[in-house]
Image (cartoon, helix red, strand yellow):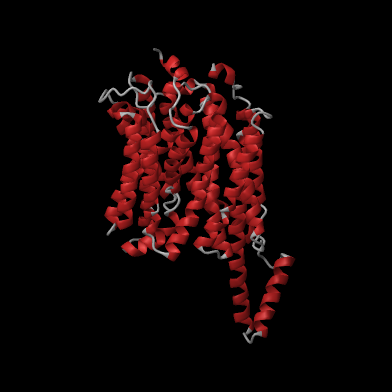
Amino acid sequence: MSNATMETDWKPKASLFLITTAVMLATFVEVLNTSIANVALKTIAGSFSISDDESLWIVTIFLIACSILLPATEWCCRVIGRKKFFLTCIAVFGISAAVCGFAPNFGVMIAGRIFQGLGGGCLLPLSQAILLESYPKSEQAKAMGIFSFGVTIAPIIGPIIGGWLTTNYSWNYVFFISVPFCIAAFIMVLMHIEDPPYMKVVGLHKFDYLGFILLVIWIATFQVMVDNGQKNGWFDSPYICKLGITSLIAFILLIWRELKTKDPLLDLKILKNWNFTFATIVLTLLFAVAYGSIAILPQFLQALLGYTSFLSGLAAGPQGIGAFAGVIFTSLTEKKIDIRRQALIGLIVFSIGCLMFSNLNLSIMIGNVIVPNIVIGAGMTMVIIPTTTIVFSYVANHEMTNASSLQNLIKNVGCAIGTSSVGVFVSRFSQTHQTYLVDKMTMLNTVFAEKFNALTANFMSMGHDSFTAEAMARVMLYKQLLQQSALSAYMTTYRVYALLILLAIPITFLFKKLNYKKKDA
């Protein structure tokens, strides 16, 4: 019996509700761990007597480990079976989370995070592939709506939960909280998930070791480069230059290897699929900007408005409300608006949210933060749901695991770039605005002269002599200069994010129209 026939005839025994619950538990806890530890890094650094820079490895090494095993997902499924591999990943992830929570020193913590990343990295593509295979083509938008909501909401509430646990209990619970999720996911997958007949177990078979080594080198050097580029001055630093050159060479050799070998680690032939390629580009750009916006907001609120880490994380919470609203909108308009137009509308909504953030000031109320967050959250799910459906619209079920792994690998690279872009944009734009404002700080500028004289007079009225009063006025104006430059930098960054999202709009016109009847026949 051919793969096509088996795909048409096979249907999972368990209900879609139970299958969805099982895989979403695993998906949620994995994505949650990409952000939940961020707010606890300073506390962990103090506990282990390490520097803040060293504590960043807790996040960096996890992200590297998550990406390393992604391309080998399909090979591992063929060796022991997808269900067994899924259960193994959940178990490794949960046990590693407990090890991190009990870690007596930094070395054990890093080892735990490596294994947690190796186990967790494959959970996302496996969950996505299982959902897409279980739902008929005509209902995949519904499946992706649920999946997208979990993927969107988890990194948003991660800092909130992490900040609350660290403040009220200890940093250890940031890792312990994953354990019950893993136990529940393990039991649910064990009871309700099954391998389809076309996912044949073939045992140990030929593996692209050279491709895997090149992939590890590329991912590791690239992730370390983007995480450490800003503080090292990017390519002014020999260290960053070496990482960049090594990453580029490894990437080129990896692509060459995968195109030439008969049994590639990454089957790049899937890129010939028009919808898969262009929709992946849109998703990668979206996640890069989304992760950048998630990272920049707490920095803005803490640096300029004096928010605590917990409150700044809590301020991002309304994105979850927006994400839920986006899911509802997509569900209600699924049969009324072409799925390609849904993605276009979502991109416009997301860019509007970024533009709303680009017009804030230092006198804002909490409502000025909540509303743009809701708009951004709505825009995210309004893009993710239809675009993810489009990505896999012309992918056969037996190709789903490979396609999902490749798509998530590319998306992870985008997330890494998006997160690192925050430091780059804020630093560069702050310098630019500072240079512009300094030119205005002269006594020839009537507004500046009046402000300077008023401050000097105010300090003199407090009993200071004229020389001291003038010095204090200059110091105060310089502090305001730095503050205003930083504010302008954050606002300009949001404008750049809005522009990048708008640049993705033309790509949506390249999507092929979906033909559900043909695919479900």
Compared with residue 302, is residue 381 higher up or lower down, i.e. above or below? above
Using residue 314 as the reference point, say whether residue 107 is left or right of it.
left
Residue found at x 50% / y 56%: 160
What is the quadrant of residue 382 in the picture?
Answer: top right
Which residue is situated farthest in the bottom direction here?
A: 463
Tell me the quadrant of the picture where the N terminus can be found. top left
Using residue 131 as the reference point, say whether residue 224 is left or right of it.
left
Give the image location of residue 116, x and y in percent: 34, 45
Give the image location of residue 367, x and y in percent: 66, 58
Give the image location of residue 102, x and y in percent: 30, 57
Which residue is situated farthest in the top direction here?
A: 1
Which residue is situated farthest in the left direction here?
A: 204
Q: Which of these two is toward me, 353 or 12? A: 12
Camera sees residue 218: no
Q: Which of these two is toward me, 248 or 353? A: 353
Residue found at x 58% / y 58%: 486
Give the image location of residue 223, x and y in percent: 40, 43
Residue found at x 50% / y 42%: 151
Camera sees residue 91: yes
Compared with residue 280, is residue 159 higher up or lower down, i.e. above or below? below
Compared with residue 153, is residue 262 higher up or lower down, i.e. above or below? above
Tell me the quadrant of the picture where the C terminus can be found. top right
What is the quadrant of residue 483 in the picture?
Answer: bottom right
Using residue 111 as the reference point, say whether residue 408 is left or right of it.
right
Compared with residue 282, is residue 305 higher up or lower down, i.e. above or below? below
Q: Which of these two is toward me, 236 or 138? A: 138
Q: Which of these two is toward me, 100 or 16? A: 16
Using residue 131 as the reference point, say whether residue 301 is left or right of it.
right
Q: How many badges with numbers are in the image?
A: 0
